[in-house]
Image (cartoon, grey):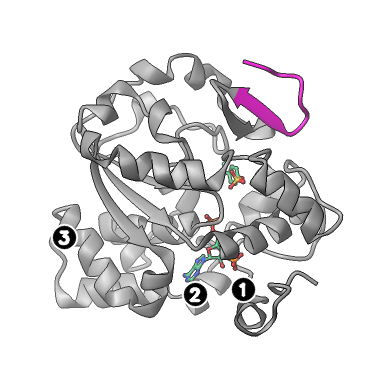
Amino acid sequence: MDNTDTYLLNFKGYYLAHFTANTDLLKNLDDFEIRDDDVFIVTYPKSGTIWAQQILSSIYFEGHRNKTEMVETLDGVPFLEYAAGKIDQLKRPSPRLFSSHLPYYLAPKGVKNKRAKIIYIYRNPKNILVSYFHFSNMMAGLQAADDIEDFMKMFFDGKVTGSLCFDHIRGWYEHRHDFNILFMMYEEMRKDLRSSVLKISSFLERQLNEEDVEAVVKQATFENMKFDPQANYEQILKHDLGRRTDEGSFLAQRYRWRLETSPDCGAK
Ligand SMILES: Nc1ncnc2c1ncn2[C@@H]1O[C@H](COP(=O)(O)O)[C@@H](OP(=O)(O)O)[C@H]1O
Ligand SMILES: CCc1ccc(OS(=O)(=O)O)cc1
């Protein structure tokens, strides 16, 4: 491992966010023990990870779905390769839900042997770029950029957490036959959230009645998540990840409308 860069940790040719990388787990990543009922959300950063976490957590945890339990989303669906929350992954009860930004070639052997289910969410890279630019300027642990051109250079050089976006998506897609994987497109989820929830629960073989489906969909709407402290990472951002500025959030979309009308992608 190359540990010299302040922001990026180069692990086998892939860049992780240095400040929160779980270096102990990474040492044995290939042999990390996978259980048959493990489920992974895999994304390139800014592709809807937090959204998928919310959907999965409320599909699996009744207490989350009906709001009788306080389940912080990141605790229910923690990252494999990041240490926020300090969870001992080996001691978690089954079924374990994970998030990951890892590329296909770093997936533990057990995942490559189809021993776990993966939901891969992909998003239009143009929207990822804009989202990532604002996010990097907000998060203390990521390298800020002076302007969108500056960030664009880093993004297209793959010098950001997650490395090159196109390699990530292409890698998982081209190797899809090695995995038990469902691909979902962020923009399609935006168009029809209910159908997306049904597709995900069917892939996971989790039977939900009509009332459950309604509850999962309601909890996963942007409007609900934006103001739900368990879902929007506000506390985690403040206390674990670290903010550079008080402005901005995981659920921003303030430039969503400008994206459709402005050639500068709402970067100003
Ligand atoms: N319920 C929801 N509906 C639509 N988009 C959502 C969402 N929850 C999160 N997102 C969007 O997903 C992006 C964050 O992705 P990630 O969780 O991978 O970091 C943000 O995009 P924007 O920055 O464009 O707003 C955020 O607004
Ligand atoms: C531990 C959670 C977390 C959240 C966001 C991160 O940044 S990025 O999405 O990888 O750019 C890193 C870790």
In the picture, the disc for residue 202 is 3
- SS at mark 1? loop
**Residue that label 1 marks:** 253
Residue 67 visible in the shown view: yes
Q: Are marks 3 and 2 in contact (CB under 8 Å)?
A: no
**Mark 1 CB near ligand 1 (8 Å cut):** yes
Tell me residue 135's x, y (percent). 69, 56
The quarter of the picture where the N terminus appears is top right
The three-letter amino acid code for the residue at tag 2 is Phe
**Residue that label 2 marks:** 222
**Mark 2 CB near ligand 1 (8 Å cut):** yes
Q: Viewer-nearest of labels 1 and 2? A: 1
Tell me residue 82's x, y (percent). 54, 34
Tell me residue 31's x, y (percent). 34, 16
Q: Are marks 1 and 2 in contact (CB under 8 Å)?
A: yes
Judge the density around disc 3: few (<14), some (14-19), many (≥20) Cα neighbours within 10 Å.
few
In the picture, the disc for residue 76 is none
* Range of residues picked out in magenta: 1-10
- SS at mark 2? helix
Which label's residue is closer to the chain start, 3 or 1? 3
Query: Real-space Cα distance between discs 1 and 2?
Result: 10 Å
